[in-house]
Image (cartoon, grey):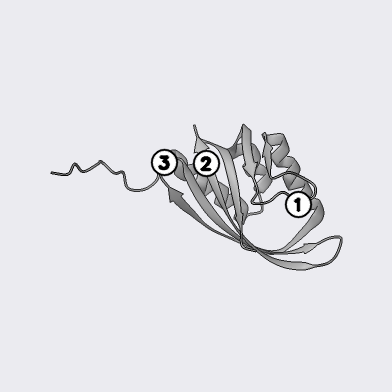
Amino acid sequence: MEQIRNITMGPNDQLRQVAEQLVKGCREGKERENLDKLYAEDATSVEAYAGPEMGREVQGLKAIHQKHDWWESTMEELESSTTGPFYHGDDRFSVLFNAKAKNKDTGEVMDMQETATYHVKDGKIVREEFFYAM
């Protein structure tokens, strides 16, 4: 007879709290507060592709803040929406982001869509990975 594994339905409370706070902060435009409140000091951020100003992967909360500095200095968000969180096991969740943004230098307006997967350990985000629709 096949053994049935004990499966817990739904994310644990700690993961749910981090995920819900991150999504709420994104919807309210409080991404900076999210960084300082929800991320581990040594967190890693991984983009789908390297950009002209930075590599694909950065390490540490200071470097993640610098990514946000670059985005804010380069792009103006005209519209945005956040969908999720979508849970995967006890240690990660994903969020779908849609945005219309204007490049401040060129004036080009772009529709953007990305999925971010966040890995959580001890109540802090330790890794984020971004996947783009091109």
Q: Give the structural element (helix, strand or loop) at label 3.
A: loop
Q: Amino acid at mark 2?
A: His
Q: In the rendering, which numbered label is found on residue 119?
A: 2
Instruction: Where is residue 101? Give x, y as percent.
Output: 73, 63
The quarter holding residue 124 reads top right
- Left or right of 80? Residue 20 is left
Q: In the rendering, which numbered label is found on residue 71?
A: 1
Residue in view at x 57 percent, y 47 percent: 22
Which of 103 and 19 lies nearest the eye of the viewer? 103
Instruction: Where is residue 57? Give x, y as percent.
Output: 67, 41
Residue that numbered label 3 is attached to: 90
Which of 35 and 2 lies nearest the eye of the viewer? 2
Residue in view at x 78 percent, y 58 percent: 75
Q: Amino acid at mark 1?
A: Trp
Q: Give the structural element (helix, strand or loop) at label 1.
A: helix
- Left or right of 105? Residue 9 is left
Quarter of the image that includes the N terminus: top left
Q: Residues within 10 Å of mark 2 (few under 14, many from 20)?
A: many
